Image (cartoon, rainbow, N blue to C red):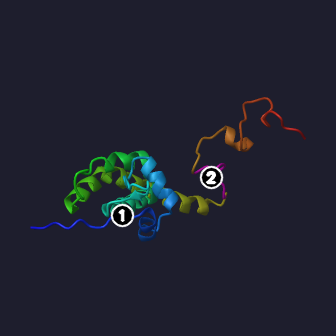
Amino acid sequence: MVTTKLPELTVGELSRRSGVPASALRFYEDEGLIRSRRTAGNQRRYCRDALRRVTFIRMSQRVGMPLSAIREVLALLPDDRTPTRADWARISQCWQHDLNARIRQMEQLRDQLTDCIGCGCMSLAKCRLANPGDQLGVEGPGPRRLADHRGEGYED
């Protein structure tokens, strides 16, 4: 069996294929999220599986995952070969609990916003539903226990 090595991608090709700016790709590399090798002319060359990794990074960012968490999960993928579907399925389980919790929080926020709009105050800072029992909130926004709550350098 003869294995054919797939051509590598330049930073420009990876950028065009992924829709991610080259500057972001270089940043991802600096952050240890993707890897490249350098040519004799010091140009970056990415394995084709970098395209899937970049897609994973962008999708993860879209759901609010910090780069540090993305880096930790990507570190679970094999370095010596292209990750398989099973590899990707395994790492997708890492965040299942966290993503379900985020979904519950978003649903709760959606429901509370409906209640807040219905109450008529139109202000989360003053809303008795969102901030029940806030004794100092009735006096208005900002710090209330300081003698001069305008702050240093404030001039009338």
| Crowd rating for badge 2 (residues with CA inside 10 Å; few <14, some 14–19, many 20+) | few
Query: What secondary structure is marked by label 1?
Result: helix
Callouts 2 and 1 close, C-beta under 8 Å:
no
Query: What secondary structure is marked by label 2?
Result: loop
Give the residue displayed 45% in from the left and 60% down from the top.
62
Q: How many marks?
A: 2
Task: Give the quarter of the image for residue 63.
Answer: bottom left
Which residues are drawn in magenta?
122-129
Q: Main secondary structure of the magenta part?
A: loop
Q: Position of residue 48 (x, y in %)?
A: 32, 64
Closer to us: mark 2 or mark 1?
A: 1
Mark found first going from the N terminus, 2 or 1: 1
Task: Assign the N terminus to one quadrant of the image.
Answer: bottom left
Task: Assign the C terminus to one quadrant of the image.
Answer: top right
Q: Position of residue 86 (x, y in %)?
A: 19, 59
Residue 90 shown in magenta:
no
Q: For residue 55, say whether it is visible.
A: yes
Q: Could you say which disc has been placed on residue 124 in the image?
A: 2
Which residue type carries mark 2? Leu
Which residue type carries mark 1? Leu
Left or right, residue 95 beside residue 66: left
Furthest toward the front, the residue is 40
Q: Using the image as rendered, state which of residue 97 and residue 128 is in the foreground.
A: 97
Q: Using the image as rendered, state which of residue 63 and residue 109 is in the foreground.
A: 63
Q: Position of residue 38 (x, y in %)?
A: 39, 53
Q: Using the image as rendered, state which of residue 83 and residue 9 is in the foreground.
A: 9
Give the residue displayed 27% in from the left and 53% down from the top.
91
Residue 125 shown in magenta:
yes
Instruction: Indicate whether 58 appears above or below 132.
Output: below
Q: Could you say which disc has been placed on residue 51 in the image?
A: 1
Task: Give the quarter of the image for residue 140.
Answer: top right
